[in-house]
Image: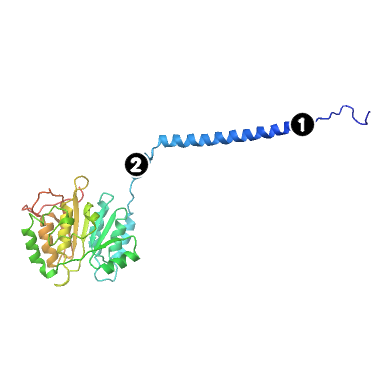
């Protein structure tokens, strides 16, 4: 039977089996591409780990230079801190003396401060890449201050001495300098009357680079004097472990008072005094041998450079 139209037309029939085969080929191709992609990613990750091991990454990060506050920022902090209406704040010159030492301190710098004062936040800021720890006599104020400033690390301590007992206590310590009041010791296990042995254990394990004694109160005979804090600072400075910076800068505020000057002379020693005025004394102490039995030597006053 003939039909009208183009006699060259052809009819093509596709068998259902061929359609199924095409779909299967596409699925196989997709699966192959997925497997290849996953294998490539795993190979890349493995190669990266092989080139840069994890411990090498840590060393690269730790070896990155530690930035310090710009000079303009330090000057601004000192300027505004010295313009406080608080009559007990330090002068600009006193704060600058401590700031200059902190700037030269090899990072990370360890700073120990006796007393929460007007300058507490300043010291933390100036030593922002180091560790700063505060020791406070008033446990309630210490807890309150740490609550409103959680970035501050402060510990409270109970002083058992009175300022009026200073000379008697200093004499007793000098007599026991070969035993429980040695200049080099772990104060955590000390029975010395002026040694603070109830601080957290890790405080005694730190090699302190700078120590500031600005507490406890010492403005009366029946309040805790600064005999214990000065003695403790003297022992911590001389008991530093070997290696690293073996010198410690110790500052004593209110140096015009009898207790501060007496304990400074006996435990920090005049030969280590590098700068002083009526309000602030600056000592530089070197680590001592563990068998040392006296705090001060008989040599004449000598000049000690800062962080040489």
Q: Can residue 23 be seen? A: yes
Work out whether residue 30 or residue 72 is closer to the camera in this orientation and state it.
30
The first of marks 1 and 2 along the sequence is 1
Is 8 situated above or below 78?
A: above
Query: Quick one: which residue is furthest to the front in this view?
Result: 17
Quadrant of residue 218 within the rendered picture: bottom left
- Colour scheme employed for the rendering of this structure: rainbow
Q: Which residue is mark 1?
A: 15
Describe the element under mark 1 as helix, strand or loop: loop
- Residue appearing at x 12%, y 67% in the figure: 258
Is 67 situated above or below 155?
A: above
Task: Indicate which label's residue lies in the foreground, 1 or 2.
Answer: 1
In the rendering, at what x and y percent does residue 13 appear?
80, 31
Q: Where is the N terminus found, in terms of image quarters?
A: top right
Describe the element under mark 2 as helix, strand or loop: helix
In the rendering, at what x and y percent does residue 139 appear?
26, 67
Residue 306 relative to residue 22: left or right? left
Task: Please give the label number shown on residue 230.
Answer: none
Work out whether residue 234 or residue 73 is closer to the camera in this orientation and state it.
234
Is 307 situated above or below 252?
A: above
Q: Which residue is mark 2?
A: 59
Quadrant of residue 222 within the rendered picture: bottom left
- Residue appearing at x 18%, y 54% in the figure: 236
- The residue carrying pointer 2 sits among few (fewer than 14), some (14 to 19) or many (20 or more) residues within 10 Å by Cα, namely few
Work out whether residue 260 or residue 222 is closer to the camera in this orientation and state it.
222
């Amino acid at each position: 039977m003939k039909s009208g139209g183009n006699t060259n037309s052809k009819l093509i029939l596709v068998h259902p089996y061929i359609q199924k085969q095409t779909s299967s080929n596409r699925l196989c191709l997709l699966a192959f591409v997925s497997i290849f992609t996953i294998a490539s990613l795993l190979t890349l990750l493995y190669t990266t780990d092989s080139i840069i091991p994890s411990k090498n990454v840590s060393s690269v990060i730790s070896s990155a230079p530690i930035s310090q506050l710009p000079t303009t920022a330090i000057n601004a902090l000192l300027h505004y801190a010295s313009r406080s209406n608080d009559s007990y704040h330090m002068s600009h010159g006193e704060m600058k003396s401590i700031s200059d030492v902190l700037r030269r301190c090899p990072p990370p710098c360890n700073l120990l401060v006796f007393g929460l004062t007007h300058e507490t936040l300043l010291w933390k800021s100036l030593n922002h890449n180091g560790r700063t720890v505060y020791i406070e006599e008033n446990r309630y104020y210490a807890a309150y201050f740490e609550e409103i400033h959680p970035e501050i690390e402060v510990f409270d301590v109970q002083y058992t001495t009175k300022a009026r007992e200073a000379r008697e206590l200093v004499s007793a310590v000098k007599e026991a300098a070969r035993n429980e009041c040695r200049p080099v010791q772990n104060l955590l296990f000390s029975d010395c009357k002026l040694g603070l042995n109830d601080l957290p254990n890790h405080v005694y394990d730190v090699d302190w680079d700078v120590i500031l004694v600005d507490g406890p109160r010492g403005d009366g005979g029946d309040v805790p004097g600064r005999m214990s804090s000065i003695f403790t600072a003297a022992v911590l400075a001389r008991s530093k472990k070997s290696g690293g910076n073996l010198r410690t800068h110790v500052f004593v505020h209110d140096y015009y008072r009898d207790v501060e000057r007496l304990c400074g002379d006996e435990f920090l020693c005049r030969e280590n005094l590098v700068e002083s005025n009526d309000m602030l004394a600056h000592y530089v102490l070197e680590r001592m041998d563990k068998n040392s039995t006296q705090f001060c030597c008989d040599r004449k006053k000598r000049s000690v450079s800062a962080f040489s």
